[in-house]
Amino acid sequence: MSLYRFPLLDDVENVELYRPGGYHPVNLNDVIGSRYKIIHKLGNGGFATIWLAKVLDEDRYVALKILMASVSASDEELPTLNKLQSQGANHPNIVHLQDFFTIEGPNGSHKCLVLDVVGPSLRQLRKHFFSNAMICNYIRQLAEGVTYMHSMGVCHGDLTDTNVLFELSNFNSWTITQVYQRLGQPRREKIRLRKGSSPGPSAPRKIVEAVQYDNVDEEWLSGGIRIADFGVCFLADCPPERLPTPVSFTAPEVFFQQKASTGSDVWALGCLIFQLRTSHLLFPAFFGQPGEAVGRIVQTLGSLPKDWQHRFVNCDLGDDHWFFNENKREFSLESQISKVEPKLTSDEAADFLSLLRGIFTYESDKRLSAQQIATHFGASRSEPSAEGLFKNGSDYEEPQPPL
């Protein structure tokens, strides 16, 4: 039975996880680690909350990621970030670790990661159309970030539109007043137990909604992009049995009991490239089920490899029909490219199709590498400025679930 009343705010963490082993209770204006004053919430996930903090006695801000107590000891993000920064240089397309420490609270010991403040995610800016020059620039930066990770023997494992962040320009120069003017005042709601009383020390006094970035001004963005959240990353030579990647970004081999790899990251990178170019998901799964994603993949790419038969993660559901149907490609890459707005020229469409075909193949070892993708978008392209970042165009239309 639920302990807490369900909050009415939208983008908040699961309040039921404010318990021993769960989230650390954080209130606005708290000082964490003796020097980080909480002024807003940046986000939340299944294993952590992320806060915007002002460094006391310094003119700078940080993103403070506080892990749940139950995962703090085993979390791989800290060693991975240390590995990625081990050569003494911070890659410009990877979120940087500035500091880390552990705090004690009513729910246990919590690892805290002090990270760069970046900005809105690709998902949060899905209603914005970018200029062609900026799209190419962003794709190149993403591919270079993935290339760097792979060169260090690291796979991200969760490359999604929530983990790709657009950089804010000169954010450390913003006053706290400007932060609230531009990002909005924190929206809060009292946490109540189901019986109506206030919670004990395991929960904060109020739940805080994450920054929504509803009214982003293009002048706030620098033109840079970063890859974030390395909580489920793994070494390329030691892949896990399962990954919690959202199904719309999961490579098909993972659904058929094969190990994830650098090729699986490239598949997810391809999904991000398509979304940056079109503002839509290539493989939407409205209910988040593996079968939905596989069905859409088949409708896009055609029949699955025969040796995958009877190996689907939910094979007891009878989903092997994919191997016997004619599988008309109702959502072929060609048909989806033809619907891109504004229309691509014939040369642009051919180039985009060639790229996608090189990424979206069932054989993971035959996919383009991240380095090849970066080279493709780096050749003969000058660096665009952040000016004119957004393109005038029709608003994004939220996809609707099937009837």
Image: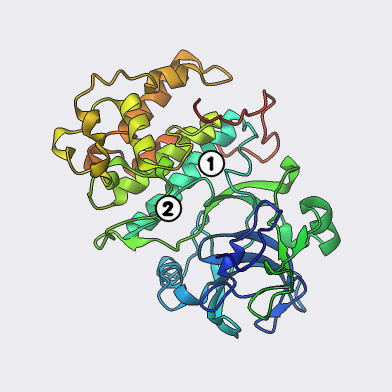
In the rendering, at what x and y percent does residue 125 appear?
A: 63, 41
Of badges 2 and 1, the one in the foreground is 2
- Residue at position x 67%, y 23% from top? 394
Image coordinates for residue 215, horizontal then vertical, percent = 76, 42
- Nearest the viewer among 4 and 144 is 4
**Residue 50 x, y percent position in the rendering:** 61, 64
Q: Earlier in the sequence, mark 2 or mark 1?
A: 1
Please say whether residue 370 is visible from this viewpoint: no
Amino acid at pointer 1: Tyr
- In the picture, measured across the screen, residue 54 lies left or right of residue 365, that is right
Given residues 241 and 76, the one toward you in this image is 241
On screen, residue 202 above or below 265: below
Numbered tag placed on residue 158 in the rendering: 2
Which corner quadrant of the image does residue 23 belong to? bottom right
Please, what secondary structure does the residue beneath circle 1 have?
Answer: helix
Q: Residues within 10 Å of mark 2 (few under 14, many from 20)?
A: many
Badge 2 vs badge 1, beta-carbon distance below 8 Å: no
Numbered disc 2: secondary structure: loop
In the rendered view, does 165 fall on the left or right side of 72? Answer: right
Q: Decide: is 75 above or below 371.
A: below
Residue where numbered disc 1 is placed: 138
At a point 39% along the width and 18% down the height, the residue shown is 334
Is residue 233 placed above or below 201 in the rendered structure? above
Q: In the drawing, what numbered circle is on residue 166?
A: none
Asked whether residue 309 is in view, the answer is: yes
Query: How far apart are the alpha carbons under marks 2 and 1?
Result: 18 Å
Q: Residue at x 75, y 78 (%)?
A: 56
The residue type indicated by label 2 comes to Asp
**For residue 176, side relative to residue 326 (left or right):** right
For the image shown, how many numbered marks are present on the structure? Answer: 2
Residue depicted at x 63% and y 29%: 396
